[in-house]
Amino acid sequence: MSFFLTKVLAALDDGGDRVLFHAGGVMTYRQARDRLRRLHGGLGTVETLAVDLRNRPETVLVQLAALLRGATVLMVPASAPARDRLAAASGATVVTDRPADWPGTDVRTLDDLDGEPAPLDPPDTVRLLFPTGGTTGTPKLIRHSGIYDGMAYIFTPSPDGPGRTLLVAPMTHMTGNATVLGALLRHDTVVVHDGFDAEAVLEAIQAHRIDTLSLTPPRLAALLDHPARTSTDLGSVRSLSLGAAPLPPHRLAQALDVFGPVVGQGYGLTEAPMIASISAAELLGRPDRLGSVGRIVPGMEARITGDGEVEVRGLSMMDGYLGGPEIGAGWLRTGDLGRFDDEGYLFLLDRADDVVVVGEHGTKVPSTVVEHALATHPAVRSAAVIGVPGLDGQLLHAVVVADGEVSPEELRQHAREAFGQEHYVPAGVDFVDALPLTDVGKVDKRALVQLVTAP
């Protein structure tokens, strides 16, 4: 029997009347197990189930019900365009709370799955499909199986008793999915938010005494900059993990100052969720490490190719892409450019697709490096850098959220002084109230390009 599903069912049995979910109302562990049995009974036999549900307790319970049926489960990407979502779920039965989005598809709603309670008998394996982010192209489907058994070994109840986890990432994304399932395996309570709102997050931390949460860099910045932050009691937080994109070093330093020595970073992909990590203890007193995503975790290996790309292999790897060969012990190209320091700490420079090639000599400019430099200006709250078409190739263009008076030329001069090279100076600067984000919380650079180049 699947070790992961066996541990999940044991956690639901052991939880009793303790609260598992705060999501508008409350759902206890006992109620969640009863709901799971009804969903399992109503689901019947299905080969592949696509889960397209917003953040709610049933999202993960439907996933578990289908896995207990031995079905392959596809978590539908919340941030992908409609055509990509339809393509990803082709041939699958779809469980959704947005039936109008699925024309011509075998669609079921949660009401359709409210069946007679059924016995829960775990199969030998779990088969999950997760899409890549889709921020740079059509998402590919990733096959995962063994990593969930690994999760069942990693996430165990704390000797200090049950904790309280805040979830803001979509449950249909690897990060959000691992967060909620990890909390269940730890016997924690999960406070579920459907989307991100900085004020609501601050209120939840204080009201529910949240001790564990995970944020992307843009969402962390929104939290740190919110006027209610200084009057919010953040003392309950004992683990704040950051990931999904490189974090500007000055923001990490600010987070350590605000939350204390509980802030760490992680690096992973949907293809390989656990690659590197760095703890608060490794950061304190080491400003040179603030730009690092940490050392490679046990069971994984990483190397830098001749063209600067990070390649990885090891225990947290996917089985492979849908329709593709097994990965086995092979190396995976991550699409991230990086370097190691002398102590084995990994520093990410940029996504390979986000490097902007500028100038007559084709100088490759990592957009992340320029973004971090612009963000050190006292009047800049956040910045994103993209490439836009010019007369002789690409031009570097910055989109900035300002927190004070600053002109485009001031920011250009700030970049000029930081780098001493004109190639790293944005040719243009636009100001916006907020950077567009995907549902996962990353800056949506495709949307930025469309915004900047729109007639």
Image (cartoon, rainbow, N blue to C red):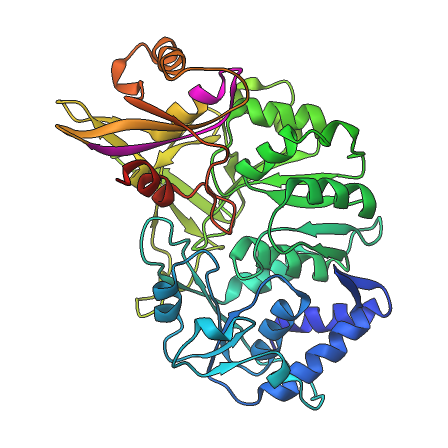
- 413 and 345: which is toward the camera: 413
- 164 and 14: which is toward the camera: 164
Image quarter of the N terminus: bottom right
Measuring from the top left, give residue 40's x and y in whole percent.
Answer: 64, 83
Residue 54 higher or lower than 435, as above or below: below
Q: Give the range drawn in magenta.
A: 374-389
Callout count: 0
Is 319 situated left or right of 309 in this image? Answer: right
- 240 and 172: which is toward the camera: 172
Q: Which residue is drawn at 70% across and 57% down?
A: 183
Measuring from the top left, give residue 397's x and y in whole percent.
Answer: 31, 28
Name, please, the residue furthest toward the front: 455
Is 319 situated left or right of 52 in this image? Answer: left
Prevailing secondary structure of the magenta residues: strand
Using the rendered image of the protein, determine whether residue 59 is visible from the camera's viewpoint: yes
Residue 20 part of the magenta-drawn span: no
Measuring from the top left, give residue 45's x and y in whole percent.
Answer: 53, 89
Picture quadrant where residue 162 is located: bottom right
Picture quadrant where residue 82 is located: bottom left
Residue 385 part of the magenta-drawn span: yes
Residue 53 higher or lower than 72, as above or below: above
Is 286 situated left or right of 23 in this image? Answer: left
Measuring from the top left, give residue 104's x and y in whole percent.
Answer: 38, 81
Q: Which residue is drawn at 45% across and 55% down?
A: 79
